[in-house]
Structures are given as structure tokens and as C-alpha cells.
Image: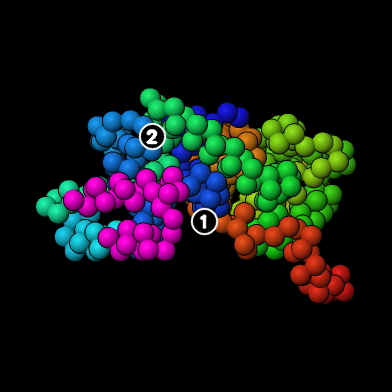
Amino acid sequence: MKKDLTNSGLDRKNILNNKIAVQEVYEQVGFYGVKFKEKYRFTRQQLAQYFEVDIRTIERIVENNKAELEQSGYEIFSGSQLRLFKEEVSGYITKIKKDQDVSDIHVGDIVKLYEKELEGWAKVPQLSVFTYRAFLNVGMLLTDSEKAQKLRSVILDIAIDVINKKLGGKTKYINQREEEFLPSAIREYNYRKEFTDALNLYIVENKFKYGQLTDKIYKSIFKENAKEYRQILKLNSSENVRSTLYSEVLDLIAGCENGYASYLKNEFEKIGRKLSLPEAHSLFVSFEQITEATLIPLREKARSLMASRDLAFRDALHEKLKEYIDEVSSEDYEKFLGERSLDLEQRLEDNKDVFKRLKDR
């Protein structure tokens, strides 16, 4: 699905929240600034020079998108913070001139510009400063700069490449890289057995009952039946739907399966016979009504996570969940792509003793 960085605030946030991609952009694109308080910093004049636009164009972008740019690191320095920044810039210029060859086009240009700007900072009470993320954010918003257009293309290519490198192209199973997936999958497997046992014990024999009532739970949680979900993620017949679900969704499915199994058992004991499939469907409606208030916050969270993550990580749009799409947090990018994320095979190896104990129970 084509990303539109100039018009979609959501697409911009999803790129900027991906720290791994931002770091890769920095390494490939360059544009080096002064590091101040652990972040590279740039001025409006430097952005104007990089994007080859008038400084008033940068000022207009800031004025029209101030809240967004502040979230990505745009700040106004004044007082002691401005004084410390000036000192850092002055020290940077001295160090570069002493230790490096400033004939490098990028470093040399930055040094010359900083030297020129320092002269004008002597009496200014405040200064607009951009972090690297804010610099990228401006590049995503600029429509009348050829360099900004090229930068957007590079950013999108790198964002896609980062995910593909981490996953080897297997975005279907990115859900399995987080730490909570395996415990959630084990819990859901156990509750799934409780659910299917209840359908067997308390509903008359009908080959459609397992699929239909499973779809009832899926639609209750994320508005799609198994067939619809398969089509969206392009799963083939041999691929298991639950192997692609996030831990939060698996936990909610487990809760619904366990709750409905108990509800079904109570009804069986009350009427003293097995239910027909239409009666079981009717009972599920009653179960939904009773649990509605309890499940609303969990269901809203599950829908938002599924819709948002699948759009960002899998390039998959859940049409029925469009209203729940939100930005993917930097924590989520770290969870699924960072150092703590692992392939399922590695997690299985790390937890083989756990599985052995489960087998021997």
C-alpha cells in the first residue's frame, strides 16, 4: 500500500517512531549536526540550505505544523539552554577544524554555516532547533523541494528494507517475535481445547459448529471471520490463523472461548440436554450481551493494535477496523524489530524445558 508522507500524518508518525529505520536513514543520508543532550541538532538555516529553499519556507512549515514538529523534536532554545548550545557548537567547530579534514562537503558546509550563524546568535534571545527526527519530519512535509522529494523516497525504501531484513520477508509472522507471543499461544491452546470440548459435549453433532462458533468469536473481537482474515493477510489453506495473531488478540480469544464454554455448560445443565446449533448461536448472542461492558476496553485495544500494526508491519488494511487505526508506537517497533525480538524458532529453543514439562504433565 503506497504511503503518502506529505498528506498522511499517520504515515509520518509510523516512520518517525521506527528508531531502527531513522538510524539507518541517518547512516545512509548523512546531514550531520551537532550532538547536544544526546541528539543531533540543526537550525532553520541549515534545513533551508539542505532542502534548497528559502528560510521563510521552513518557517511556514513550522508555523503550520508546530504541534507535530514539537512531537518529533523541534524546540526553541533560550536562556541557559541556548548558552550551552552555543558553547557546544563553538566546541564542535574547534574540534572539527583540529581533528578532521573539513573539505568533506557535508562536514565542511555545516562548519561554515555554524560559524556564520554563531556571529548572529550573539544577541538573539531564542533559537529554533530541530532534532534529526524533526529534520526528517520537515522533509516529509515540504512539497516544493526536489531534495525533500528524494529524501521521502529514500525514507520509504529504507523503512521497507529494515522490516524485510529483520524478518526475511516473512511479515505474516512478525507477531511471533515479541516475548509475550509464546506464553499467550500456549494459554490460548489450552483454552481452545476447553472450548472445543464444550462444543462436543453440549451441542448436538454438527460438522459446522466448530467453524461457525469460532467465527462468532472472531467477529465479536475483530469484526472478521476466518475467511476474511485469511484474505487480508493472504494466508494459504495450510497456514493457521492463530499463528499470525498478536498476543493481546490471542489472550482475548482465550477469554471469550473459556467464557462461552462455561456459559454453554451452564445452559446444558439447566435444560438437561444438548443444544442445537441454532440454539448455540442464540446463546452466543446472549453471552455477548452479558459480557459487553466487561470486554469493551479489551476489545477496543485489540482492534486498534491489530489494525495499526498490520497496516505498518504487514501493509495489510483491515477495512472493517479502519476507524481503529492509530500510529504504531516506538515501543512496538522495538518489541517486534529490536534487540529483544526473536524468531519463534529461537524462542522455542530457549523454552524447550518448558515444553518438556508441559508434555510430561
CA separation, marks 2 and 1?
A: 31 Å
Up-down relation of residue 331 to residue 47 (above or below)? below
Give the secondary structure at mark 1: helix
Tell me the amino acid under the disc marked 1.
Glu
Q: Main secondary structure of the magenta part?
A: helix
Residue 11 visible to an observer of this rendering: yes
Q: Quadrant of the N terminus?
A: top right
Residue 356: name its quadrant: bottom right
Magenta includes 62?
no
In the rendered structure, the answer to whether residue 133 lies left or right of residue 302 reads left
**Circle 1 crowding by C-alpha within 10 Å: few under 14, some 14–19, many from 20:** few
Residue extending furthest toward the top:
144
Q: Nearer the viewer, mark 2 or mark 1?
A: 2
Magenta includes 113?
yes
Q: Nearer the viewer, residue 316 or 95?
A: 95
Question: Residue 231's x, y, as percent?
Answer: 73, 31
Residue 259 visible to an observer of this rendering: no
Region of the chain picked out in magenta, as a range: 90-119
Give the secondary structure at mark 2: helix
Residue 223 — which label?
none
Question: Residue 326's x, y, as percent?
Answer: 48, 41
In the rendered image, which residue does mark 2 sit on?
51
Q: Quadrant of the C terminus?
A: bottom right
Q: Nearer the viewer, residue 321 or 33?
A: 33
Question: Residue 32's x, y, as percent?
Answer: 42, 51
Residue at horizontal 45%, vertical 49%? Answer: 104
In the rendered structure, the answer to whether residue 284 lies left or right of residue 24 reads right
Residue 331 — which label?
1
Residue extending furthest toward the left:
123
